[in-house]
Image (spheres, coloured by chain):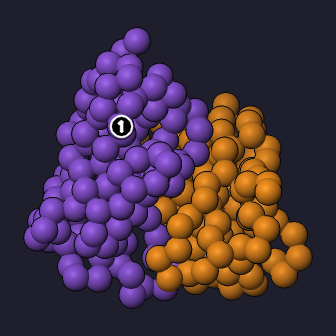
Chain colours: A orange, B purple
Amino acid sequence: NAGVMQNPRHLVRRRGQEARLRCSPMKGHSHVYWYRQLPEEGLKFMVYLQKENIIDESGMPKERFSAEFPKEGPSILRIQQVVRGDSAAYFCASSRRSSGDTQYFGPGTRLTVL
Amino acid sequence: DAKTTQPNSMESNEEEPVHLPCNHSTISGTDYIHWYRQLPSQGPEYVIHGLTSNVNNRMASLAIAEDRKSSTLILHRATLRDAAVYYCILRDGRAAGNKLTFGGGTRVLVKP
């Protein structure tokens, strides 16, 4: 069984460009979570999505960040007009159910903003 | 969210057991105790979870105090591959889709 897939694994962007991070959940999982880990810091929750719905975006920065999980295809975390402070590892997790179910994490996308 | 407290780091010798403590004095009756670990340059990995009774799986054992205000993750025979940051996390069993709130965790160093 394939685990959670994330791509790209490494992404380099210049300031002002857009970054798109993709996450394919495990087969049979319809709940997706995004977390961010800044250098030398812990993981912080960003957003929780189910198919076509954003359920909890309490951890998302107010500007430039958006997320979607369409009916078909992977979940996308989009960062517009990136700044150096966006450089971090972005992890996606998925679960089968919502209530307290185990979350399985992908390998992450490491974003570097030059 | 109820808070957990863990030591910043621990050292162990290879092939020896490792006992990782976690204090959660404000735990509520519906909070499950979850453990995840993060190996270097990888995403977090589920280890084990429990509510009241001690739990065992192929990776580790979880010992939960009778009053549930603390718990201990036990790695029975540490290997070099167990070097990671271990996170103790409380999750409310009633809350739908609740996020994981990671603290600082315990960095485990395994010496050969």
Question: In front: B29, or A76?
Answer: B29
Residue B91 screen position, x and y as percent: 37, 72
- Can residue A8 be seen? yes
The x, y position of residue A30, in whole percent, is: 71, 77
Q: Quadrant of the N terminus of chain A?
A: bottom right
Q: Nearer the viewer, residue B92 or B77?
A: B77
Q: What percent of the width, then of the height, locates residue B93?
A: 39, 81
Q: Amino acid at mark 1?
A: His
Residue drawn where x is 84% and y is 81% of the image:
A71
What's the chain of the residue with tag 1? Answer: B
Q: Residue at x 40, y 47 (%)?
A: B60
Q: Is residue B82 left or right of residue B24?
A: right
A8, A18: nearer the viewer: A8
Q: Furthest residue to the right?
A: A72
Q: Residue at (51%, 35%) from the top-left corner?
A: B39
Vertical position of residue B69 compared to residue A69: above or below:
above
Q: Which residue is mark 1?
A: B76
| Residue found 49% across the figure and 41% down from its top | B38
Quarter of image, res A65: bottom right
Helix, strand or loop under label 1:
loop
